[in-house]
Image: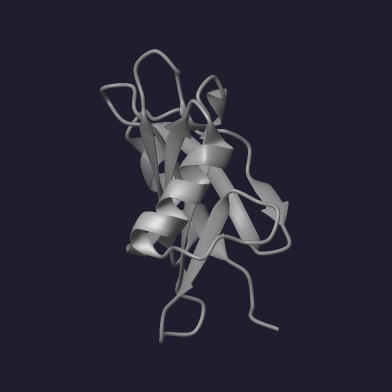
Amino acid sequence: MANVTGIGGVFLRAKDPDALTKWYGDALGIAFMSGGHFSMFIDEIPGSVTVFALFDHDDSYIGDPQRQSVMVNYRVDDLDAMVARLTSMGAMIEDILVEENGRFTSSTDPEGNRFELWEPGPLD
């Protein structure tokens, strides 16, 4: 059975991503990637990475800007099996995207909160 193995990321809306990136860096010591609004926390378990990212307030990537402030990315061990389970429960699943760091898809929970599923790719 497919399972969530951790939190792959937490994404926040920001009215001013540059200023909020600076604030999180200054206030909490989060080291953001050069020129970007995201940071990666590398866990001791191979492939266990957690991302913290800031998005423009009006960006629809993390759901409806009027009702959703945060989106969780769940790291999974078998994306295909997870998609099959969610589909069997009646969930609508977005197309799977294959990227450099793994495979992704998104869906919404019964209350309309968008979430993302991520199956990490092999480590180089």
- Residue 51: in sight, yes or no? yes
99 sits left or right of 92 in the view: right
In which quarter of the view is residue 60 placed?
top right
Farthest-out residue, left: 111
In the foreground, 85 or 79: 79
Name the residue nearer the viewer: 26 or 68: 26
Height in image: 25 above or below 16? below
> Quarter of the image containing the N terminus?
bottom left
Rendered location of residue 22, percent (x, y): 50, 49
In which quarter of the view is residue 33 placed? bottom right
In-front residue for pair 66/122: 66
Q: Is residue 61 left or right of 13 when viewed as pictured? A: right
Image position of 81 (left or right of 123): left
Image point 70% across, 53% down: which residue? 35
Residue 81: x percent and y percent?
45, 56
Question: Where residue 46 sits in the image (x, y, percent)?
Answer: 49, 84
Q: Is residue 2 visible?
A: no
The residue sitting at 47% across, 41% down in the picture is 20
Name of the residue lying farthest toward the top:
66
Up/down of 1 relative to 111, above or below: below
Q: Position of residue 124 (x, y in %)?
A: 71, 84
Residue positioned most to the front: 26
- Residue at point 27% right, 25% down? 110
Instruction: Classify 89 as above or below 57.
Output: below
Left or right: 77 in relation to 122: left
